[in-house]
Image (tube, rainbow, N blue to C red):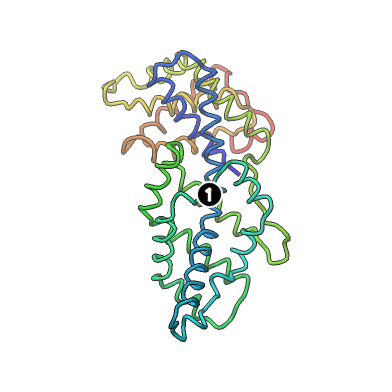
Amino acid sequence: MLSRRLLRIKAVKALYSHFKSESDSLIVSEKNLMLSIDKTYELYLQMLWLVVEVANYAENRIELGRRKHLPTPEELNPNTKFVDNRVVAALRESDALTDYLQRKKLGWVQAPELVKKLYHAMVESDYYRKYMDAPARSFKEDVRLVESFYTRTVGESEALEEALEEQSILWADDADFAVIMVLRTLDDMRASQTDVPLLPQYKSEDDAVFVKELFRKTLVGYGEYIGYIDKYTSNWDVERIAFMDNLIMAAATAELLSFPSIPIKVTLDEYIEIAKYYSTPGSSVFINGVLDKIVEELTAEGRIRKSGRGLLEQ
């Protein structure tokens, strides 16, 4: 499922797009946010199918070798360990996965060169050679091979990045998140299962409500939150404060005020981590200091009210 951190990132990016486009429609911007989240989930399932396409390519190569006029002994008796991989077979035979891909018209038919490049990169890798040369066959080894394909071959592929940008502009930054979800799915797979345990889009409906509310609350209360931020950045050169810094701090402030069940420490830690990847160098330290002061003031005003799980680590 999509993590709360990814949902926070999506909300912040949607806020950035809303302000930069000078949109005056909360509804349109919210629809774009939810579309972006849907597309990330689609990418997860698209990526999960990628190893199947590579295995199909490998199988076609084996068949072409066998059909040669004068095939070599190796072509007549190929090592089929990869094409017979039970994880790949389970993905290929998964009704839930194939139905979803067909319904959304997803797949890699339009990217044969990418599949070819990934196949050759995998075949040349040490992890693949070790797997193919090992005499034993086990479901655990099959899983490990597919995990290595995603972490090493897919994770290092520039061609994949280009292919994703061509298929959807909304996929450009989400490949790493999709691979993490793929790895979680592989970790959940068991030889005894009758179908692949696909992750749901959300852990619960609460997550869908959370990301919508976070976006709305930040947008509606943005002016007020910037007032708090300005109070504690008055000694800074305004031009040196990145716009993304303000968005991150505003979203954090909205979350502090609007979600009683989320502990203060969780909120602060999450947005400080987001700043490390989506703002300027040093922003995380700056944001940490400002948010600490905002928390002190809002607590003194009695505006931060936590309950249930939100009282943890207070």
Which quadrant is home to the N terminus? top right
Q: Which residue is depicted at the point 50% across and 75% down?
A: 131
Q: Relative to 44, is 290 above or below? A: above
Q: Which residue is mark 1?
A: 107
Please state the horizontal and vertical placement of residue 60, each as a whole percent of the image: 50, 67
Q: Could you say which is closer to the camera, residue 291 or residue 156?
A: 156
Q: Relative to 157, is 5 above or below? A: above
Please state the horizontal and vertical placement of residue 264, each as a whole percent of the image: 55, 32
Q: Secondary structure at mark 1?
A: loop
Which quadrant is home to the C terminus? top right
Residue 211, image quadrant: top right
The outermost residue toward the bottom is: 73
How many marks do you count on the picture?
Answer: 1
Q: Which residue is depicted at the point 52% across and 59% down?
A: 51
Left or right: where 101 falls relative to 193: left
Please state the horizontal and vertical placement of residue 249, each as a whole percent of the image: 44, 27
Q: Which residue is depicted at the point 66% across and 35% down?
A: 309
Residue 167, image quadrant: top left
Q: Could you say which is closer to the camera, residue 215 or residue 52?
A: 52
Q: Could you say which is closer to the camera, residue 58 or residue 289?
A: 58
Inspect the image, locate mark 1, and give the three-letter code of the amino acid beneath it.
Answer: Gly
Q: Relative to 212, is 77 above or below? A: below
